[in-house]
Image (tube, grey):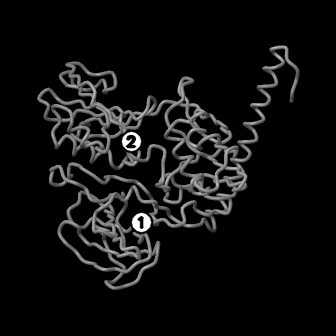
Amino acid sequence: MILFVFSALLISSYDFNMSGTNVNVGSISEDICPDDSIPSDFQTDISVIKGKILPDEGFSGSMLALDGIKPEHAIEVTSTLKDHIDFRFLSAGEDFEIALDKEKNIVSGFSYMPDPVTTHKLTRNEDGYLEYELIELPTDIRYRHVSGKIVSTLNQALNDAGVTPSVAAVAYGILECIVNFRSDARKGDQFTVFLEERYFNDVKLKGGKVLLASYDGKKTGYKVAYAYRDAENNSAFNAHYSRKGEALIRAALRLPVDKVHVTSSYGQRIHPVTGKKTFHYGVDYRGAVGDPVYTVANGVVTDTGYDPVSGKKITVRHDDGTKTVYYHLSSILVKKGQKVTSRQQIAKIGRTGRVTGPHLHFGVVDHRGKWVNPMKRKMIATPKLQGERYARFLVQMEEVDNLIKEHINNEKMLARYTLIGLGGNELF
């Protein structure tokens, strides 16, 4: 069995973006004994402060909303976590706890619990550093085949079928790319979504993976898309494609990196170097020195250079008037005035300028000259899977089709024996 993860398509994601729901900070408790979720080997005189991830705040802003948390606490925690957690996946309302020493000067430990079975834990080790540990309880993988007819809207149909809002958004985003709902959708059209979901103690966890989404309409005919899983979990190619391997978003920006791991999102944050709360006008992608950096669309290089803050940098102006910037590079492979094409390598990731480690800072300026959130732009790695990736995709599609057949047969078998047990006629 293959596990599939949906990424790269930024039209939607499984909790890829911070929720817009208003969430209260919640109660703040200070206990003079260790909390159950804090390691037992902590010193006894500690304060445990509980909080929740706030909308559009991330770890830094959410921690600083709590009494007793200082900027240096937030910086140390986020700096340690960023190499282990992709910050795209943070969702408002998720729980975390901070353990401070008696004087509230030192972080003794930190626990982030995105769901009941996962804990990202930091513990102060003997050398004085925060050490990371991932704790995952065993879960059951189950599949669900959801199908129905369009009566009013697809969103309503998915809701009526019991698909959770976050997963429904993913399914809708996929189908929206292959069906024009405004002009082509008709009442009575049928849809199918095949899901992979996790259960703990027979309770379904939030989220899920859309392995297949299809639409069969009077005007549209049959349309289907499958999840593709690359060899690496954070591959920029992990997304949904048609059976021919065509990306669902054709007029999108290409991703500037091969591996997608966001260490700092767009918005307010505590700067890891200055320690001040500042606005981050871009997205930081984790990478190693020398990893390739690609331009996201056709354009012209308008600036290359260096400054003490941005380090080695490139600016590209695109055909629609948008500009993209690439900072902290180790080397620049293009010249000012040079024309570049989409997904052309223009540089290598570095750690130049004011940084704490190697990464790519990627920013977008719209045609009006305003910084915008890159994560809200439609971005993909490739318009079409080719070569080894397409060969792998063919195998994965067959596996999903077989899973669906097996799932449907099992449902029929269950219904058959249920009817027999109830004294009914055998219908299958």
Q: Are marks 1 and 2 in contact (CB under 8 Å)?
A: no
Q: Identify the residue shown where x is 41% and y is 72%.
A: 295
Picture coordinates of residue 158 (x, y %)? Answer: 59, 39
Q: In the figure, 43 relative to 365: above or below?
A: above
Front residue of this view, candidates 4 and 321: 321
Picture coordinates of residue 38 (x, y %)? Answer: 30, 27
Q: Identity of the amino acid at label 1? A: Pro
Q: Please indicate whether residue 252 sits to the left or right of residue 418 in the image.
A: left
Q: CA distance from mark 1 to mark 2?
A: 25 Å
Residue position for label 1: 256
Circle 2 packing at 10 Å, graded few (<14), some (14-19), many (20+), is some
Picture coordinates of residue 17 (x, y %)? Answer: 40, 47
Q: Identify the residue shown where x is 76% and y is 26%.
A: 414
Circle 1 packing at 10 Å, graded few (<14), some (14-19), many (20+), is many
For this orientation, the residue located farthest to the left is 103
Front residue of this view, candidates 316 and 349: 316
Residue 19, which numbered label?
Answer: 2
Mark nearer the N terminus (1 vs 2): 2
Q: In the figure, 131 relative to 226: above or below?
A: above
